[in-house]
Image: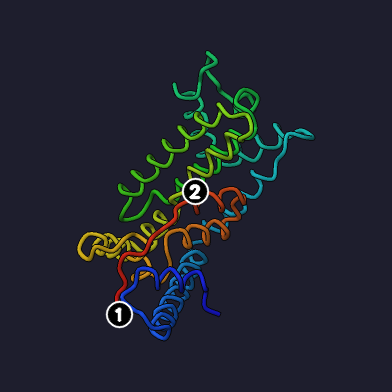
Amino acid sequence: MLSNQRKNKIAENSIYIDQESIDKQLEQEIAKGQITLLSLKQEFDKNKQFPAMGNSISQIMSVTNENGGIRELADIILRDQSLTGKILSIVNSSSYNQFGGEINTISRAVVILGLEQIQSLSLSIIVFEKLNQGPMAETLKSYACQSFLSAFFAKKLVEQVDAINSEEAFLASMFHNLGQQVILYFFPEQYVEISKLKIDSKFDEEAACMETLGLNFTDVGQYIALQLKLPKNIIFGIQTKVYKRTSVRS
């Protein structure tokens, strides 16, 4: 069944005025989107590291403060030497270490910074370390840096509001642009095409994505977040923009 919301969205800013044309446009987008999702799943399954990432994420995020959670989380992190080193490097940076003295064990990092903050850092490192590879590595690293800075400042801002969990704000902001990074990692040529459409054809971001992928970046980000078994608050945080379609091709 075609989405009424999507129909209204196309009709609102489209050159088409009849229902048949709107339905045809939607059908084309849906077919293209299904192909994109199938291709994403094939790439995801082909690279064995991604399912392993999902398992690691599930283990880390399942730990709670009850029943020895600090020791349990430390043990999970210590199984990954690279993750351990990166966490210790970050928590000893000037941005994090406001307590004086070097933090030289994961257990101490969890005690001082809190279980949720170390979970957030671990989750971000696991995902973005993998995505910062490939032929578009420099652009991906730039995205990762922007995401981390955005997450850091979001956390600092909401710490002033008691009703909001600052770690949830950190994660939601950190993964907000996951869809862009996933397309850039798996399908760099399509990402370039989207960028060209935005410049040359005066498409907005969603219209360019729908023209190229049959999906927008939010769809892609949420799909991958589900594949990686990321927490629900991250999946929700990926979708915060309200797009307005400004151009549609026949």
Pick the front one: 80 or 182: 182
Residue situated furthest bottom in the rendering: 20
Which tag is nearer the camera, tag 1 or tag 2? 1
Q: Amino acid at mark 1?
A: Ser
Q: Is disc 2 placed on a helix, strand or loop? A: helix
Mark drawn on residue 250: 1
Residue 202 placement: quadrant: bottom left
Position of residue 124 relative to residue 219, above or below, is above
What percent of the width, then of the height, locates residue 82? 50, 39
Residue of label 2? 127
Position of residue 246 relative to residue 165, above or below, is below
Left or right side of 57 for 91: left
Image quadrant for the N terminus? bottom right
Point 52% across, 33% down: residue = 155
Pick the front one: 240 or 168: 240
Pick the front one: 54 or 211: 211
Q: Is disc 1 placed on a helix, strand or loop? A: loop
Point 46% across, 58% down: residue = 218
Q: Amino acid at mark 2?
A: Val
User: Of the residues under marks 1 and 2, which one precedes in the sequence?
Assistant: 2
Image quadrant for the C terminus? bottom left
What percent of the width, then of the height, locates residue 114? 63, 28
